[in-house]
Image (cartoon, coloured by chain):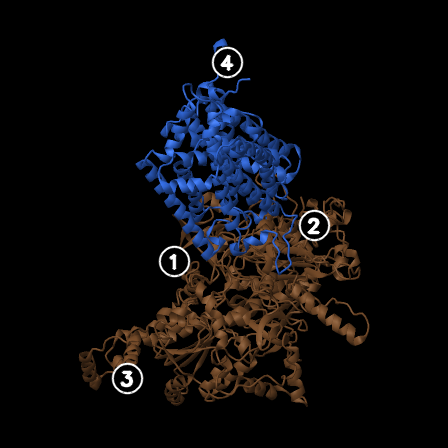
Amino acid sequence: MPEQYKSTTDLERAPVIEPGHTFGTVTEKISAIVLTRPASNGWFIGFGLFFMLTMMMLFAIGYLFLKGIGIWGVTIPIGWGFAIVNFVWWIGIGHAGTLISAILLLLRQSWRNSINRFAEAMTLFAVAAAGIFPAIHVGRPWLAYWLFPYPNTMRVWPQFRSPLMWDVFAVSTYATISALFWFTGLIPDFATLRDRSEKRWVKMVYGMLSFGWRGSARHWHRYETMYLLLAGLATPLVLSVHTVVSFDFAVGIVPGWHTTIFPPYFVAGAIYSGFAMVLMLAIPIRKIYGLEDFITERHLQNSAKVMLATGLIVAYGYGVEAFMGWYGGDRYDAFTLWNRLHGPYAPEYWALLICNILIPQVLWIRRLRTSPIALFFISGVILVGMWLERFIIVVVSLHRDFLTSSWGMYYPTRWDWMTYIGTIGMFLAAMFLFLRLLPAISIFEMRTLLPEAEVKE
Amino acid sequence: MNQDEFVQISKREEVCPGKKGKLDLDAVRAEIDKAAKHGPEYWRSLEELAGNPEFQDALKREFPKGASEWLDSVSRRGFLKVMGASLGLAGMTACVKLPNEPIVPYVRQPENVIPGRAMYYATAHTLGGYANPLLVESHLGRPTKIEGNDKHHGSLGGTDIFAQASILGMYDPDRSQSVVSMGDQRSYAAFLSAIRGPLSAQKALQGAGIRILTTTISSPTLADQLRALLKVYPQAKWHVYEPVNRDNVLEGAKMAFGQPVETRYDFAKADVIVSLDADFLYGGFPGNVRYIRDFASRRDPDLGQMNRLYVIESTPSATGAKADHRFPMRASEIERFAQALSSHLPINAPTGGVAGDNPGFSAAIVQDLLSHRGSSIVIAGDHQPASVHAFAHAVNQALGNVGKTVFYTDPVGANPVNQSESLKDLASDVQAGKVDLLIILGGNPAYDAPADVNFAEVLKGGKAQLRVHYGLYQDETAELCQWHVNATHELESWGDARAFDGTVSIIQPLIAPLYNAKSPIEFVSTLSGQPDASGYDLVRAYWQKQHTGADFEQFWRQSLHDGWIEGTTYQPKSVAAKNDHIGWKSTTDTAIELNIRRDPTIWDGQFSNNGWLQELPKPMSKLTWDNAVQIGPKMAERLHLASKDVVELELNGKKVEGAVWIQAGHPDNSITVTLGYGRRGAGRVGTGQGFNAYELRTSGTPWIASGVQIRKTGATYELASTQGMQSMDTPDGGHRPLVRETSLEEYKKEPGFAREEEVPQGLTLYPRYEYEKEQYAWGMAIDLNRCTGCNNCILACQSENNIAVVGKEQTLLGRHMHWLRVDAYYQGDRDNPKAFFQPVPCMHCENAPCEVVCPVGATSHSSEGLNDMVYNRCVGTRYCSNNCPYKVRRFNFLLFQDWDTAQYKMMRNPDVSVRSRGVMEKCSYCVQRINEHRIDAETASVREGKEIGIGEDLQSACQQSCPAEAIIFGNINDPNSKVSQWKAKARNYSLLGELNTRPRTTYLAEVRNPNPELES
């Protein structure tokens, strides 16, 4: 007992960066992945596979444009299916990146430095994957731009009462800020790559991307100011984007949607799934590229703790929903609860409870929190669980609403699956490119973690 | 042209799709040699002579190769989509010059024709010979919508589904478009020359070899023509056959009165109605439109005495659903039940010793009947044996109902023979080689004759030397006849027909025949040697002969205008029932019985190719596109069957396979199948749907057969039902008060039982619009007590609003497009549940949940309270549908509308936009009709110089066609409007009103009038 207690104290914490590194070794190790290490066969196979999946997605979308939304499983009463489920899932995944880079920056959690870069890339790619769905899921995708308030000859504006409208602003703002934030953070590292690369055209490309960074004190000063400002802008977005996404449902009248718990519980769920995705990416990356020194047990542990905490918030959300279904006395809400537990989609609901609540409880065990393999699988389970959560919210609420005469069932088609799996392919293909073309870990921020960086008064 | 160009052109010809194959000269020579002996006498080209397969192919094709591919709408559509470039080129077509021929502008307007203004013509639609009087809306010469003839006492404005759907039938592109002989298109003149010889040969034989087979005919002109024809050929015979016939009714009348009489009822005067398996409140029953009106007029608990309906029935029907007391009983036991009942009623009928053997409820029925002498009706179903009909006649006579609620008239059919016998006689004559010339005038006996007659084999046998089929389709029968003559649709031809009460309507054409066809009257006139007589002249001449008064022209014009001929209504006859006349044949059979019934939507199969009727949910099961093996819940449990299990039915060695549908309220040990499915030659819509129940039907037991075997095959088959659940009880044990109902007694104590506490106003974040300030606020009230679930409103809406048919696959997915649906719910004991109908159009909520969530404002509220849909603005997020608690919004998931077929373009209502793919649509309260009336009212105001508002003559399409007057639409800002009066009634309630949607469509709760003695 005392042994265990001791092991969780600060004193015994694993370091953020393994000892023995210098400025030089850090720079060398990270930039080598991009500049000197040849791309392995594994990389080509992986990238090729995911690129093919991306192509499959484009094919599915092309056919969708040709035939119409009817190739999917959506119907009346289930007007939204995989597209919205996947949209919410991807947007949620993106949240961890922003949380890590912005909120943890403001909170001066310096351990974030080794994972923030690829977490941000993950955000960007996840938002890109998410962004596909709202655009293609509408019946007439060629008119989807009508959701934007642009000056037009029709003199018609969007309908600002609609949560979908708010979504447009929330998601587009989020995508913009995430891209800016990510790019800004990359500028000093672009300069490092420029300086270290040998080929002229590579130098030129990184040179242009680095905007003429010379590392002067003035540059650093401006950089820090801007980065902090962007972090300040991004921080409320972590909370607001998924809140707005949750309004899509909470504002609706459908039993199972119409609840005020949605905003906080969506945000927690987003971070929950986001950290799971971070771990699922970080664990193989650190293994393959030998980055165990930079992404240490400490990072794994911290991420696991965040997952544990947000997972409990999500569990609380489920509990409140269930309690209000029973306590509220509304016959439709009560039935929604019953239907989740016993209806035709009950296996999905029970699977959700197992994936999101039951299995992650093993993270209380320190040994599992520090085991990369265990964490990898638990993260996978959480990602499945969070996808199921969105499926339950979107599909299961809709399939049995008010009038029993209008109840229906939802069966995803092969086009639904192709599009969904295709976005995973696109996301991973982009990650593969990112690993080869950009420093996956922030070089200059890692250097600040070294003892050498300590400024002595 | 220089040499190069010439070469290029000839090369181009080589690659053109109509390129000829290489000609084999040897084959040609061989054929010429053969032709000298027995080859074709004339040939069009060497290719034909050589039997070149490409030429054979070209003969069969209507268009040259390549060209007909363009007729395939799907591939053409797909092609256009891919060829985005063609859009860019489309503008260039504007550069085409006008043709050189002289064309004439529309300078002088034809009288009465105002473009954009519909005209209405009175005509009629017949089913089983009975006319349904109609007014047909016509836009610039194109009929677009069927309405009931409100001046005709057979309609009073209502229609039935078959009449509504007949407009689609007329525009059906699969209709036969030419005379066909042995697979070749021929001219009518060719047919005339082919038949001239045989006819003149028969003259010598006095027509001994001529047989004419018709469907039930009530047309005085046609009957007169046929009789005249029979005078010319005295030995010829006229046979009548229709699969859904009224043989039993006829036999019952003969049993009771010794003569065939038609029975007519006055349900408005009946306080107690006992139905012995009669579905008299559903389309197809003669007079149902009027009967529904009369029945419904007695279902208002606030107006006079409510009637009481007892239904003893086998297959659950819409009539049974409306009953105050419904008793499920196997069809074969109903005769025994009647027999048992007869001993308690003052009639002269033998009881046959089953006196005491009757269920407990019959005493209460007897008591009720006895205390309503002269104001009750006992009515027997068409498929019940003659004895049950005779029993009904006897009871009605004994109770003094005749002359008060029940009337006897001459039969409506012009040739009231036993149709099963008639067809059998014809078949045996053919087999005996007595028939040289068989003329099948309408009908499809090769498909729908009883299995034991097997008319297809009779035709195939070739013993009838010359077989001529006259009909709308090149169907199964046409295939087996040497000649097929294409018929006109009733909307294209002149004719006449009798309604259920004998009143004659002149059938006026709304449009010239689309495919150069002959009407039945013109066709028969051809047979009697007058091939050029026009239908108009023939009908007019007949009525001129009948007319005795002075001014024929005035009479004729009046008759055409009104839609019926004055003085043709049959007067009630007085007939006396014979004593001891009922020939009971009841048995106590415990074998499984098979009920064979007409299909509620496609009838006997004649509407198989009608997409509206195929997709129209059957009233009780809500199934579309298929027939099913209907069994009761108990039987399903015993046999371990579930809905959609495929079973094999075997009767007398004949087998068919069909999917099970467990129908609540279906009696045990009994199976129901419906006719009309399993067709091979129906057309693109109907071919291959469902299974053919005619295989099990014999002339001896056309409706109720005993001893059917049922076996599970292990396979399953998807059945497309449009309703998710048919219960208001949720599986968690909860109950949702969607349809609210009480008994008359309870209602008198608590008239406001259905009302709920009003949700206070101002619970929404958004400002309330003050509709009170407007002149109009549109609203609707639906009386659930009056609604009989006849489905008519669905089709009226579909026709009025250009609603697409989506097909079985899409219906299975839940994507049917009906703007208005009729939900059917069951409550209570599954073996004998209460059933309810609830028509659900858009509620036009004042706080519409759909409106706030639309990101582009494509659905928004009008100042008069309409929830409008702006199709052009809709991008198709489907959020509105998700947020609609009533799920009345319909989405074009794919391109459901047929944009290419020319016929459908003519059919559509020009006042309503045709929606395309990716757009949401829903009930608009017929906004096009509101605006039409608004324009009229405004013009009238200007003309009269005073304010004239939109009057009560504004009707939504569903309201107009509703035979029960269950739907009222109008201005709720006018306290005197009918809709306001209905909404002020105590039993008015809002569906899901607790959601604060403030729906403009409200319901009047159902009140039943059960017999207190039977309420335990």
Q: How far is disc 1 from disc 4 in space, using C-alphas?
A: 91 Å
Front position among marks 4 and 3: 4
Residue type marked 1: Asn
- Are labels 3 and 1 assigned to the same chain? yes
Q: How far is disc 2 from disc 1 in space, using C-alphas?
A: 61 Å
Q: Quadrant of residue B20?
A: bottom left
Q: Residue furthest right?
A: B946
The residue identified by callout 2 is B847
The residue identified by callout 4 is A11
Q: Is residue B1001 above or below residue B730?
A: below
- Chain ID, mark 1: B
Residue type marked 2: Asn
Provide the secondary structure element on which disc 2 rests: loop
- Chain ID, mark 4: A
Q: Is residue B351 above or below residue B289?
A: above
First reached walking from the N terminus: tag 3 or tag 2: 3
